[in-house]
Image (tube, rainbow, N blue to C red):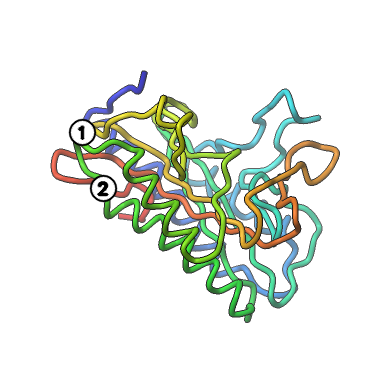
Amino acid sequence: MAVLKSPREIELMRAAGRIVHQVHEKMREMIRPGIKVEELGAVAEEMILSAGGEPLFKGVTSPATKFPFPSAICASVNDEVVHGIPNGRILVEGDVISVDCGVRLKGYCGDAANTFPVGRISPEAQRLLEVTLGTLDLAIEEMRPGRLWSEVAELMQKHVESAGFSVVREFVGHGIGQQMHEEPKVPNYTDRRQRKQDFRLEPGLVLAVEPMVNAGSREVKSGDSSGWPQVTKDGSLSAHFEHTIAVTSDGVCLLTDGR
C-alpha cells in the first residue's frame, strides 16, 4: 500500500529534490562534446555529499547484476535507456545523454531525470526529446486528486505513439518517500494487466513519474555483461525525463524543480 506523506514530509522531500535539481543544472552546464561521462558522475557525487545528502543510486544491488551500482548518477547515452554507468566514454557532437539522479536528505528522497543534447543534435533526436518531455508535462497537467492513474497513463501513451515513438514497459515510475522505491508502481502506459494494479490519486501521495521513450521499438535488452545498462533492442535512441511530484488537495506540486 502507498504511504501518504504529511506536509512536513513533503517539504523534507522538496529539500532533497532541491539538491537533485542543482545537480541537473550542473550537468546541463558541463555536458558538451569532449567531456568524459565519468567526470559527470564525480562532480554529481561531490555536490550531493557537500550538500549533506546521500547518493541514492550508489551501492544499489540487483539479482540481475554482477556488482553494486558504482555511481551517484545513471548516465545513459544514445541507445541506453536506463542505468548507464558513468565511464571513460567521451561524448561527441550529436549524442544525447539521459542523467538520472536521486538523493536522500534527512531521511527523505528526491529523484529526477533529464535527457540532454550534446552540442547540435539531429532533428529526429530533438523531436524525441521534445515529445518525451512533453509526455511528462502532460502527466503533470492531468494529475489531480480523485483521478485514476490509468487515465493519465493512457494519455501519456497516446501522446508518445501519436508521434511515432514507443513507450518502454520494462521500467516504470514509482512511489517515493523515505525509500527510493515505494508503492505504487507508476507505468507510462496502460493495458489490461496494468489496470488490475490501478490506483487513485489522493492528497499526500508522492510519485516519481518518469516516461522513457524510444525512437524505434519499445523493446529493451541488457547492454553488457554487468547487467546494469539497458539498451534499445533495435539500437534506436532513447530519452528519459522524470520529476518527483506530490499530489495536493487542489492539484500537484513538483518537488524536484528547484523551488
Could you tell me the amino acid type at mark 1?
Answer: Pro
**In this view, 212 is above or below 110:** below
Front-lying residue, 249 or 195: 195
Relative horizontal placement of residue 72, taking residue 1 as reference (left or right): right
According to the picture, the residue beneath numbered tag 1 turns out to be: 203
- Residue 196 place in picture, x, y as percent: 41, 25
Relative horizontal placement of residue 156, taking residue 169 as reference (left or right): left
Residue in view at x 39 percent, y 47 percent: 154
Q: CA distance from mark 1 to mark 2?
A: 11 Å
Q: Secondary structure at mark 2?
A: strand
Pointer 2 local density, CA inside 10 Å: few below 14, some 14–19, many at least 20: some
Quarter of the image holding residue 105?
A: top left
- Residue 33 place in picture, x, y as percent: 71, 75
Q: Residue 253, which numbered label?
A: 2
Residue sticking out furthest to the front? 192
Residue sticking out furthest to the left? 250
Residue in view at x 64 percent, y 36 percent: 58
**In this view, 116 is above or below 241:** below
- Residue 32 place in picture, x, y as percent: 65, 73
